[in-house]
Structure formats: C-alpha cells, structure tokens
Image: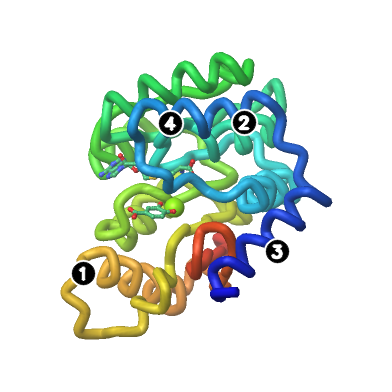
Amino acid sequence: MAADDVWTTVDDYLVGELVAEDEALVAARELGRERGLPPIEVAPNQGAFLALVARMAGARRVLELGTLAGYSTIWLARAVGAHGHVTTVELDPRHAEVAQENLARADVGERVEIAVGPALDVLARLAESGTEPYDLVFLDADKANMAAYLELALRLTRSGSVIVGDNVVRRGAVVDPSSDDPSVQGSRAFLHALGNDPRLEATALQTVGSKGWDGFAIARVR
Ligand code: SAH
Ligand code: DHB
Ligand code: MG
C-alpha cells in the first residue's frame, strides 16, 4: 500500500472509533463538492481536534479565516455552545453562500457571522472597531498572508487566547527557503514569527492522514 493509502485507512479507522460525524457535517462536505468547491476542508478527526482545542480553551468567541463550505466552522460553532459566537471570514461570496446553507442546516447559523471579503481588510476593520477579544483564532485562508494575519490576530486576542494555523508543512515544501511558492514563504514567515515573538508561546506538529502530509501550528498568547 502507498503511504497515503495507509494514512487514509488509519484515519478512517480513527474516525470510525472516535469521531461522530452527524448528517449535517456530512452534508456540509457534500454540498461543497456538489457546488464545485475545492476538497480542502479539514478531515473529520481534525475538525474534532479543533473543537477539542476550543473546548479546552473554554472558548466562547472564535475567529476563523477561510470558511469554504463551513465544515470547520460547524465544528467550532458547536464547540462554543449556544451562547458562543464564531466570526468566519471568506473572500469568495459563492463559498460564503454554500457555507450559510450548511450552517443553517447544522442549526448554528444564529451563532455564526460570515464576513465576506479579504481577511486583511476584515481583520483590520475588526481591530479598529475595538471588538471584544477572541478566545481562539483559526488561520486557514490564503497562506501567503499568514504572518500578517498573525499580527492582526494579536490585536484581536488577549492573554491566554489560542491561535491555530493550518497547512504549515505542505508535504514538506515548507523547508525550502528559496521556494517561489507564496504559500510556502507565507507559512515560513508565520512559523518564524511564532518562534520569535515574545508575545507568544508556540509549537508545530506534522500530521499525516486522509489530507496527506501537512501540519498545524498552535500558539498561546502570553
Ligand atoms: N476552514 C475550511 C477550509 C478553508 S479553505 C474548512 O476546514 O472547512 C480556504 C478558504 O479561504 C477558501 O474558501 C478561500 O476562498 C478562502 N480565502 C482565500 N483567500 C482569502 C482571503 N484573502 N481572505 C479570506 N478568505 C480567503
Ligand atoms: C489548501 C488550503 C487548505 O486550507 C488546506 O487545508 C489544504 C489545501 C490549498 O489551497 O490547496
Ligand atoms: Mg486548511
């Protein structure tokens, strides 16, 4: 068996044992496929991981960059509970429209606001507006701007808030300092900032599974 196949087989096993994906989550992924959105949502066990991080952090307010069809958004919205709030930012209005349908079906539409626009603009606007701090930020939009998103996230969080970044390994591509891929350079700048900013304590983990070989970075605001 090729490595990717065995990773997927193990993921299927882990998900079967541990992750209860209900109809709304399955339907969210499927509607994304039906409408031609790219199949780049987190895996079920990764969604459950994000939800656990949110619960462990006691998160009531979550900020997500990159909504896609709302699959990870549903996990996060469930994790914050009925009195919690998720702000999720999406550049593509067609993605936002699919996500809105999926969130309504999952019955979390009321606790989620989809902000449509470039994340840099939306975050700058949120920071200007002096909004209440977020307890958890999930960075999963374009990777070229990861370092800028981190800087803005620090204006939107408090001591103890958690920041998670997706896709920081990209099949190992992240180790190439001369890469001409803006996603790689963005992830590298992000990781460098995480490791060198005195306001943060952070680490990163490689992952394999149904989404291939990738990784998460996780940080806590001091
Ligand atoms: N978090 C989702 C996956 C997000 S995929 C999940 O796991 O279910 C990345 C998304 O980021 C795509 O929908 C893409 O349209 C969006 N995106 C890309 N560039 C963006 C930008 N500059 N601002 C906001 N969203 C962006
Ligand atoms: C891509 C984006 C993601 O957020 C992800 O988890 C996987 C792939 C992409 O743009 O290719
Ligand atoms: Mg991602």
Q: CA distance from mark 2 to mark 4?
A: 11 Å
Q: Secondary structure at mark 2?
A: helix
Q: Position of residue 105 (x, y in %)?
A: 58, 15
Q: Nearer the viewer, residue 183 or 79?
A: 183
The amino acid marked with disc number 4 is: Gly
Rendering quarter of residue 221: bottom right
The answer to whether any part of residue 202 appears in the image is: no
Density class for disc 4 (Cα within 10 Å; few <14, some 14-19, many ≥20) is many
Instruction: Check the image and report above or below for 13 versus 88.
Output: below
Instruction: Check the image and report above or below for 131 versus 147.
Output: above
User: Could you tell whether 106 is left or right of 132 in the image?
Assistant: right
Q: Nearer the viewer, residue 4 or 126?
A: 4
N-term mark: 1 or 4 = 4
The residue labelled by disc 4 is 32
Q: CA distance from mark 3 to mark 1?
A: 30 Å
The residue that appears at 43% across and 48% down in the rendered structure is: 40
The residue that appears at 21% across and 69% down in the rendered structure is: 181
The amino acid marked with disc number 3 is: Val
Label disc, if present, on residue 54 of the rendered structure: none
Density class for disc 1 (Cα within 10 Å; few <14, some 14-19, many ≥20) is few
The C terminus is located in which quarter?
bottom right
N-term mark: 3 or 2 = 3
Label disc, if present, on residue 10 of the rendered structure: 3
